[in-house]
Image (cartoon, helix red, strand yellow):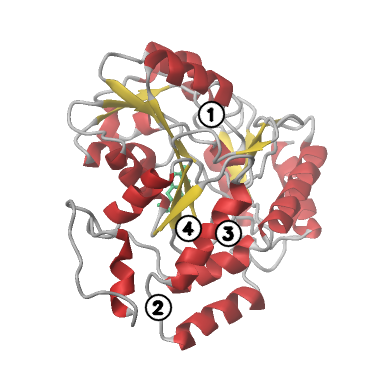
Amino acid sequence: MIREDFLPLAKPDITDLEVDAAVEVIRSGWLTTGPKVFEFQDKFSRYLQEDQPLYTAGLNSCTSALFLSLKALGIGPGDEVIVPTWTFAATSLVVEWLGASPVLCDIEGPSLNICVKDAQKKITDKTKAIIPVHMAGYPCDMDGLETLRNNYNLKIIEDAAHAIGTKYRGVNIGNFSDVTCFSFYATKNLAMGEGGAAVCRDNALADRIAKLGYFGINKDAFKRYEKAGTWLYDIEEAGYKCNLDSVHAALGLAQLSRIDAMNDKRRGFAAQYREGLANVLEFTEDSDEHHHVFHLFPIILPRQADIHDFIFRLKERNIGSSVHFTPLHRHSHYSDRFAPELFPKAESLFGRVVSLPMCSKMDESDVDYVVSHVREILK
Ligand SMILES: *Cc1c(COP(=O)(O)O)cnc(C)c1O
């Protein structure tokens, strides 16, 4: 039986809690950056932090967070930044916007995460930073990255767009590096529509990123509209315009109160997929040691399967899917600079990785439906 409605790859999990929170802010008369944003920043820091405090700069996207973090850490023309080839455009383009060069490196294998050994091979005396990406919500080898950071005096800026609630050896992602960047884009585990954050261990760095995200104007800028504020403001450096607003922050606060429950649902669906599809295909990595939040549920097709045909047949059965990601070195913008031979692991998986529907809005019968059709297609 083919279901009548289309099962999309993902839907934002919005309830009355989010709707009411947004309406309240809209009615309040304060729409842009203000108290709701500061409350979100505080609560987000407290959600992530372990034994040391964390500081959050709320921004309009993860892309902005990555860009401003690199900028605040002094990355600029002539510098090299190592980026895994298996990621979204944002991770490497932000490096180019600063006049620096992204240096692509291979992935480990089925985790789809950065290969620390290959990253080490790509280090030159121009290398200033590495941007690891926790693919699908599975943590990167943070111990390996920490060793590189110490041995080569590098900055680590994590792309944690998929990884809110992810833990590495039981510790929340957000506690490991100079800056960790999160996305609250419509499809992400915590959805605002558009939004992002840079989370820092150093308060001064978080303030600097927030300032760069608002024209380089000092941090009390938004108080100037209040009775207690002063009329005087100062542009301290050439900043940008990437601030988070109160409507999105209100959505974020409501989502944050539900994030663990939403992530648990995803983990339950992932377990159900794994059980249902065991012996039919391979999965990306998971382990008891780490806490995977399954922003995505990527599967690895058997070598002989045809990905176009597979996706087409899913569609015929009203099942959405997607590919995360086409490796960067496979795109026209990069293919002149980076030959496929440089990325044996990514090449062996390219064209075989497909994301199946995954979001906390689904239910167990949706997963059962996908499982039975994937089994049938691959028979
Ligand atoms: C979504 C995504 C981003 C960008 O997030 P935005 O908030 O849309 O800017 C960056 N990196 C990865 C890996 C992503 O999936």
Depth check: 226 or 130 in front?
Answer: 226
Give the answer, above or below, for where 263 lies relative to 343: below
Q: Earlier in the sequence, mark 3 or mark 4?
A: 3
Look at mark 2 in the image and give the residue it sits on.
Answer: 31
Q: At x 18% / y 62%, what residue is drawn? A: 234
Q: CA distance from mark 2 to mark 3?
A: 19 Å
Look at mark 3 in the image and give the residue it sits on.
Answer: 43
Look at mark 1 in the image and give the residue it sits on.
Answer: 113
Amino acid on which disc 2 is placed: Leu
- The answer to whether the residue bearing label 3 lies less than 8 angstroms from the nearest atom of ligand 1 is no
Q: CA distance from mark 1 to mark 3?
A: 28 Å
- Would residue 85 be found to the left or right of residue 315 on screen? left
Q: Secondary structure at mark 4?
A: loop
Look at mark 4 in the image and give the residue it sits on.
Answer: 185
Question: For the C terminus, which image quadrant?
Answer: top right
Are the residues flagged by discs 1 and 2 in contact, CB closer than 8 Å?
no
Are the residues flagged by discs 4 and 2 in contact, CB closer than 8 Å?
no
